């Protein structure tokens, strides 16, 4: 059986580690710890749950407890579980930060009534996955709604991390369910609110929404609506697409490697990332500066910049942006500084957008030369973008906006 830690999405883990070191996150965690210590029993989560919901004993819900035990064993949690239900017509479930060696999982009554055993198994595994990956260590709600509002960079990082955290939890749920169709049905029900009694679920039709998003957005990440940037959960068809990729990976008995899986998932999730070509932030400016310099260095890798390469370059930077007197050698000499500036400020998905656009320049003549590929790999390595993503992008049918 695959270790639960190995299932975790790499983008979740890297952002999680970075956020834990953020001064604001540390300060909020310290404030919460002091508040819990001073309020004691009054702030008890268990006390609140006992007062506002129904605890599902094993006598009342033996099947639900059997699912919980199996999922807990699959994820190697080793903690006592308490299950609760609350009255709600909205399908929902949540896992709370543990107290006194107990972990609390709560379900909406409508979900338990409408979901079959395999679907509940996915939901249970998903919620337990949040505990397995210590997602409660980053109190995103307190940070975003607190008196001291986070800066825009931290806010975007928190939302991006939360979406990748959901991908990790989805993988834990899929690991527990061992049934991709049931997983997809669960996410469809959560997204639509339908029970499945009045409609016939079709996975291909559901996933076609991802293709429709790509058409509407022109290309991943280059037109994502602003509300996407500030969404804590990925759009449900994107989650199913990411789980299809997981199902095809070595983590679920398939053939796709873990690096290929992570690169593929980041590509899908980039649909919810903001554009940098028109952004006014310092991060967006540094991303554009890197694209500008690296595009020209790549185009000149074989000693001559072609008309096709100039055409792609000017689609990014405007007509007549290319000048014959540009100092390519100077741009190449400063390339590593520009790479470092982006790596310091940009998220991994943002860095991937730059690499993706550089691939368009490299492919302007129909294919990339070894010299062009070497520069692409240099940029990707400097930004911690997997080389597998470069390979996939070079093989994809892409066109610039």
Image: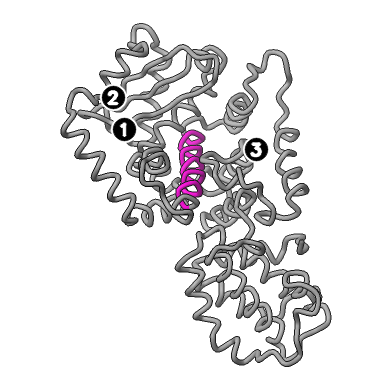
Magenta portion: prevailing SS class: helix
Residue at the image point whose x is 52% and y is 17% from the top: 111
Residue ID for mark 3: 237
Q: Is residue 363 visible to the viewer in this orientation of the structure? A: yes
Residue at mark 3 to residue at mark 1: CA–CA distance? 28 Å
39 shown above or below 250: above
- Lower position in the chain sequence, tag 3 or tag 2: 2
Please tell me whether residue 62 belongs to the stretch shown in magenta.
no
Quick one: SS at disc 1? strand
Residue ID for mark 2: 45
Find residue 1 and report its horizontal and vertical position in percent. 42, 40
Q: Which mark is residue 362?
A: none
Find residue 124 and report its horizontal and vertical position in percent. 44, 27
- Lower position in the chain sequence, tag 2 or tag 1: 2
Question: Could you tell whether 230 is left or right of 4 in the image?
Answer: right
Residue at the image point whose x is 70% and y is 32% from the top: 203
Quick one: SS at disc 3? helix
Residue 29 figure quarter? top left
- Foreground residue among 162 and 142: 142
Residue ID for mark 1: 97
Residue at mark 2 to residue at mark 1: CA–CA distance? 8 Å
Residue 276 figure quarter? bottom right
Which stretch appears magenta?
157-175
Residue 285 figure quarter? bottom right
Foreground mark, 2 or 1, reads 2
């Amino acid at each position: 059986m695959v270790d639960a830690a190995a299932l975790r999405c790499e983008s979740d883990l890297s952002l999680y580690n970075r956020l834990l070191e953020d001064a604001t996150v540390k300060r909020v965690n310290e404030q919460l710890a002091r508040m819990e210590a001073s309020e004691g029993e009054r702030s008890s989560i268990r006390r609140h749950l006992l007062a506002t919901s129904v605890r599902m004993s094993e006598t009342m819900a033996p099947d639900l407890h059997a699912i919980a035990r199996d999922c807990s064993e699959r994820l190697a949690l080793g903690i006592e579980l308490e299950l609760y239900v609350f009255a709600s017509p909205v399908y929902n479930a949540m896992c709370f930060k543990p107290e006194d060696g107990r972990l609390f999982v709560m379900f909406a009554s409508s979900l338990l009534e409408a979901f079959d055993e395999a679907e509940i198994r996915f939901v249970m595994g998903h919620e337990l996955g949040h505990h397995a990956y210590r997602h409660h260590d980053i109190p995103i709600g307190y940070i975003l709604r607190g008196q001291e509002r986070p800066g825009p960079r931290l806010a975007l990082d928190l939302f991006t991390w939360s979406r990748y955290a959901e991908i990790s939890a989805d993988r834990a749920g899929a690991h527990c369910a061992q049934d991709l169709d049931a997983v997809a049905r669960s996410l469809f029900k959560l997204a639509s609110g339908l029970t499945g009694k009045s409609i016939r679920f079709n996975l291909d039709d559901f996933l076609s929404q991802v293709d429709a998003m790509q058409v509407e957005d022109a290309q991943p990440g280059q037109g994502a609506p602003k509300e996407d940037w500030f969404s804590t959960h990925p759009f449900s068809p994107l989650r199913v697409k990411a789980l299809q990729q997981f199902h095809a990976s070595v983590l679920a008995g398939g053939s796709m490697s873990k690096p290929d899986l992570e690169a593929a998932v980041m590509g899908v999730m980039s649909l919810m990332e903001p554009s940098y070509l028109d952004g006014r932030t310092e991060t967006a400016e540094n991303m554009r500066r890197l694209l500008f310099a690296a595009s020209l260095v790549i185009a000149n890798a074989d000693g001559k910049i072609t008309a096709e390469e100039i055409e792609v370059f000017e689609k990014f930077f405007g007509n007549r942006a290319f000048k014959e007197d540009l100092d390519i050698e100077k741009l190449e000499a400063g390339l590593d500084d520009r790479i470092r500036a982006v790596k310091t400020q940009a998220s991994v998905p943002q860095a991937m957008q730059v690499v993706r656009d550089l691939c368009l320049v490299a492919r302007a003549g129909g294919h990339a030369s070894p010299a062009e590929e070497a520069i692409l790999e240099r940029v990707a390595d400097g930004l911690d973008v997997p080389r597998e993503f470069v390979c996939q992008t070079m093989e994809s049918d892409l066109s610039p906006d």
